[in-house]
Amino acid sequence: MSCSLLNPLPVGSGRCQLPKQHPSLRPSLSTQFPGALSRCGWRTKMVGPMRPKFVVFGSSIVQFSFADKGWGAEIANLYARQADVILRGYSGWNSSQALEVVDEVFPKDSIIQPSLVIVYFGGNDAVINFPTSVPLSEFTVNMTKIASHIKNLSTTTRGIFLTPPPVNSEQIRELFPGLEKLRTMENLEKYTDALIDICKEIGVEYVDLFRAVQRRDDWLTFFTDGVHFNEKGSHVVFEEIKTLINRANWVPSLAAGSMPIEFGNIRGLRTFNFEGSGIILD
């Protein structure tokens, strides 16, 4: 018998206990389903000890972020042995499509909720006269609902929303003549400002990629096609997200330097100083 991802164990099996975990997981378990774990014998882990879950949810800028040296891959590497970074990227999507599935991607009745959700939608919404276009007023409604949904998943679920980044119009024109007229900096700025207002109103964090990217002198070299980030651009996104997490006044902290390392306290392991030895271990 199974139930979703949790795999219930028979009551009285003697295995109904919570594994050691990051404090951010405990409130969502106890406040949403008080006593449910002990009564029903839920098994709450799939692979090893339970780690905090970080979910990256968005369109192609999210989907492609887990490629080699992408910003999502950098986050996963930073939190190796500390958190499970989960990709939910859907290339070509806009905020209307995201709103349709947000309840399925982030079910409110799940016993285990993510500790962090990073959301990116808006770039496709802001394209002018295109199948993905979403009017600014509708985008505002969509993202308000999505932000509220994420914030209310649990008392310790944190949200970070990424604004649309700028585009290299000349690069778009060279690769896709005519499309540069559909992705304009002026329209992207409008959607950026609307999202920032939403985040301030709802009370979730945001990264203003539109302006953060442009603060770099060489920002026009950050793209593969004028829209999607290359390695240089991805690293800027990663640094902006990491900086926000490090300075956020969250309890518990989600900064990599503050989170426990899985099996970091295992005793009996011999330690070596490999510096300068030329020895490489896998």
Image: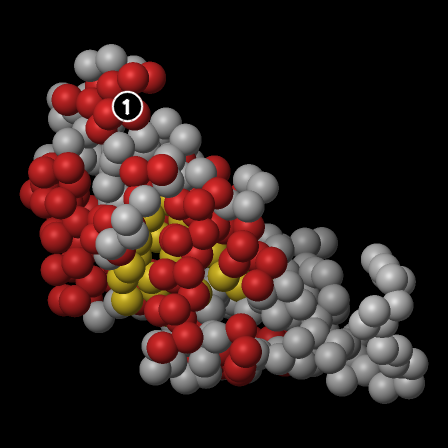
> Where is residue 162 shown, x and y percent of the image?
30, 53
Tell me what residue is drawn at x 21 percent, y 35 percent.
Answer: 125
- The answer to whether one can see residue 278 in this image is yes
User: Seen in the image, is 282 located left or right of residue 214?
Assistant: right
Task: Identify the image quadrant of the N terminus.
Answer: bottom right
Query: Farthest top residue?
Result: 177
Task: Identify the image quadrant of the C terminus.
Answer: bottom right
> Where is residue 89 shown, x and y percent of the image?
44, 41
Q: How many marks?
A: 1
> Where is residue 13 shown, x and y percent of the image?
79, 75
Q: Is residue 159 above or below residue 267?
A: above
> Where is residue 120 shown, x and y percent of the image?
33, 48
- Give whichever of 158, 191 is nearer the camera: 191
Tell me what residue is drawn at x 55 percent, y 50 percent.
Answer: 73
Give the structural element (helix, strand or loop) at label 1: helix
Q: Amino acid at mark 1?
A: Ile
Q: Which residue is mark 1?
A: 172
Q: Is residue 24 above or below residue 71?
A: below
- Give whichever of 220, 145 is nearer the camera: 220
Quadrant of the rendered structure where residue 31 is? bottom left
Quadrant of the rendered structure where residue 37 is? bottom right
- Give whichever of 146, 168 is nearer the camera: 168
Q: Is residue 274 above or below residue 166?
A: below
How packed mark 1 is, by other alpha carbons closer than 10 Å (few <14, some 14-19, many 20 or more), is many
Tell me what residue is drawn at x 48 percent, y 43 percent.
Answer: 231
- The answer to whether one can see residue 86 in this image is no
User: Seen in the image, is 210 located left or right of residue 30?
Assistant: left
Quadrant of the rendered structure where residue 39 is? bottom right
Tell me what residue is drawn at x 15 percent, y 37 percent.
Answer: 185
User: Seen in the image, is 235 located left or right of residue 85?
Assistant: left
Q: How is the image coloured?
A: secondary structure
